[in-house]
Amino acid sequence: MIVQFVIKFIPSESKYLWMYSGAYVRGFLYWVLRRINRIFAEELHRSKGLAPFATSPVFKGEDYSIEKLVEGERYSFTISVFVEEIGEALKDYLMCIDKITFAGMQNELCSVDVRYVEDFGDEVVRKFGVKFLTPCYFRIPNLHYRFVPLPLPQLLFRSLARMYEAYVSRLPRSYREWLDSWGIAVSSCKIRTERITLKKGMWSVGFVGEVGFSIPDDTYNEEFSRITSKLLRFGEYSNVGGGRTSGLGVIRRL
């Protein structure tokens, strides 16, 4: 089960963000987890495994590229937690405060919306679109962790499958083999790359925009089509690719 939080706040002062706002959201989450359980937070921070959460950057309306917080205006960010116990502890904390420490300021907490998600559907898909709202990139470990800022379907759905198997349920091994055999193709692409700073001396490049995908007739498989649909819905909570715990790889199915 995924526990998703949409947190709305009003800055106490105007302030430029010197790094990507998703990195601030990640820092906020670890700050809260340390207050709840310092030992667990430190172990989670040191872990090299798949972190059980994903975040968005700070956004206002449909704008996910906030570089400055303006005093008195309302902003939002989301946190999705894949372990129910952590989600409940986070909910208990957020429900008993009226201010949040964020970007080095004490800010007014407007609201916290909590959603529990455990059904990702399994409809049949043949053609579908994905909007990459925040920069997305993929890593290929066996190529010295080469970074790939392209919407390659093999990398996209392998990334989603890895997260899904870690926190939801197993998938057939044959699905990955199908992906590697170009079971899914890119049918249209309108993207651009963006460079963002995650912390001092550390930056990343990813792509944003809209991409159309299709399952060609000669590779169509109903079971794999349903898995693909399920992974897309899951990905709207988990993000995809590298840096997803810092608000990268936020996607929406079109």
Image (cartoon, rainbow, N blue to C red):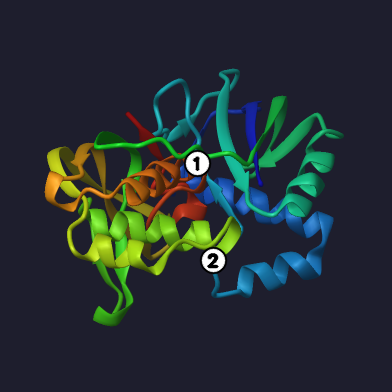
Residue behind mark 1: 56
Q: Which of 138 and 204 is in front in this view?
A: 138
Q: Which of 56 and 14 is in front in this view?
A: 56
Instruction: Tell me which corner region of the image, top left, top right, bottom left or bottom right, holds residue 186.
Output: top left
Measured as percent of width and height from the top left, residue 12 is found at: 66, 27
- Left or right: residue 84 compared with residue 153: right
Helix, strand or loop at label 2? It is loop
Measured as percent of width and height from the top left, residue 159 is found at: 39, 59
Say which label, 2 or 1, has the lower sequence index. Answer: 2
Q: In this view, does 240 lie above or below 115?
A: below
- Specify few, some or many for label 1: CA neighbours under 10 Å numbering under 14, 14-19, or 20 or more: many
Instruction: Tell me which corner region of the image, top left, top right, bottom left or bottom right, holds residue 166.
Output: bottom right
| 2 and 1 marks in contact (CB < 8 Å) | no
Q: Which amino acid does label 2 sit on?
A: Leu
- Specify few, some or many for label 2: CA neighbours under 10 Å numbering under 14, 14-19, or 20 or more: few
For discs 2 and 1, the disc positioned in front in the rendered view: 2
- Left or right: residue 87 compared with residue 137: right
* Disc number for residue 50: 2
Q: What residue type is labelled 1?
A: Ser
Measured as percent of width and height from the top left, residue 227 is found at: 40, 49
Mark 2–mark 1 distance (CA, rounded to whole Å):
17 Å
Can residue 18 be seen at all in this image of the molecule? no
**Residue occupying the point 49% across, 44% down:** 234
Helix, strand or loop at label 1? It is loop
